[in-house]
Image (spheres, helix red, strand yellow):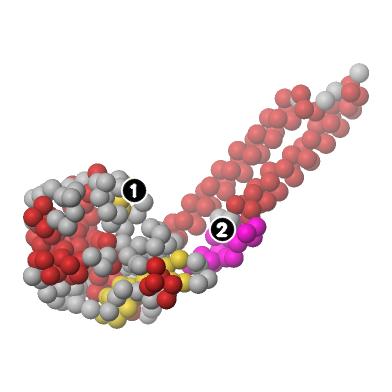
Amino acid sequence: MLFEKFTDVVPSFWGWLNQGPLTLTIFLHTIIILPMIWLYFKEKKRLNGK
Amino acid sequence: MSQNQSVWTSIRFWRQSAAWVTGFAVILLILLTFDTIGQITMGTDADLKNGITKRVPAPTVINYHIDYKYDQKRGHEVPVIGKKEPFFGKEWSPKEAKELLHLGKLTSQAKNCMNCHTLLGNGAYYAPDLTKAWIDPKWKDMIAMTGSKTKEEAMVKFLMDPSNNATHGRRMPNLKITKDEAMGLVAFLKHMSSIDTNGFPRGFSKGVEEFKAGGTYAH
């Protein structure tokens, strides 16, 4: 199952995060990759502007 | 010249990325730690009286009947704290229960139960997993073997002289456990059995038929 039902005793954002492999993967990739894209273009602009 | 310079070879880019990932991971781990602390904090006697479910109930859970029920939604068995039942023939106050449990914990460490047994996922699998030992239906045989009236009494007799009450070829050695220590251990094990471990160990204590029916072995 791609998305698993939330089944924790105490419902919380962190519990949701740890439910299945997919939710955690999407969350971590979003949070890590998105700023890196921004960093990439910032750096490209800086290098090319020299 | 600088028009074709690649960002992938830029040390600055990688340094900033590493700083971001490390910093974010640190924050996430700190937040997850606090979330975990909240989830594993022991409940209180009032929680038990008011029927509030906690992953780790108060020590006074030894005054209640502990059962398990298959939860369709969660896909495994969950603890059900039932009606009150005497433990060693009496009801234990929060202070007494805490002290008894503490003695049991210290004894389990002093006698190194984990050298052969598993407790909450820690230890060995030479001897049976003790995480849900309290609700093991095999204690019924021990009640008969030791001529006891209750399960806790039978467990104490077994713990004080395990090698002469063996039910398996791998005999537990006599660890010179005193009666008080044995009572502490039984309380420790009963409390441990009431902890919601997300269904660990899988399918404990049940036959396939009982499991399908969603019921338990218990009375």
- Please name the residue shown 59% across and 65% down the image: A5
Q: Which of B171 and A43 is in front in this view?
A: B171
Residue that extends furthest to the top in the rendered view of this protein: B1
Q: Position of residue B147 (x, y in %)?
A: 8, 70
Q: Which of B186 and B60 is in front in this view?
A: B186
Residue B88 seen anywhere in this rendered image of the structure? no
Residue kind at label 1, given as amino acid type:
Asn
Place residue B145 in its image quadrant: bottom left
- Please name the residue shown 91% across and 24% down the image: B3
In the displayed structure, B196 sits above or below B52; it is above
Looking at the figure, which quarter contains the N terminus of chain A? bottom right
What residue is shown with label 2?
Answer: A19
Could you tell me how far apart the alpha carbons at marks 2 and 1 are, in whole angstroms?
Answer: 22 Å
Q: Position of residue B174 (x, y in %)?
A: 10, 49
Q: Which of A11 and B24 is in front in this view?
A: A11
Q: Do the dots labelled 2 and 1 sit on one chain?
A: no
Q: Residues within 10 Å of mark 1 (few under 14, many from 20)?
A: few
- The disc at residue B122 is 1
Q: Which chain is disc 1 placed on? A: B
Is residue B79 rendered to the left or right of residue B104? right
| Secondary structure at numbered mark 2 | loop
What is the magenta range?
Answer: A1-17
Residue kind at label 2, given as amino acid type:
Gln
- The disc at residue A43 is none
- Please name the residue shown 39% across and 68% down the image: B208
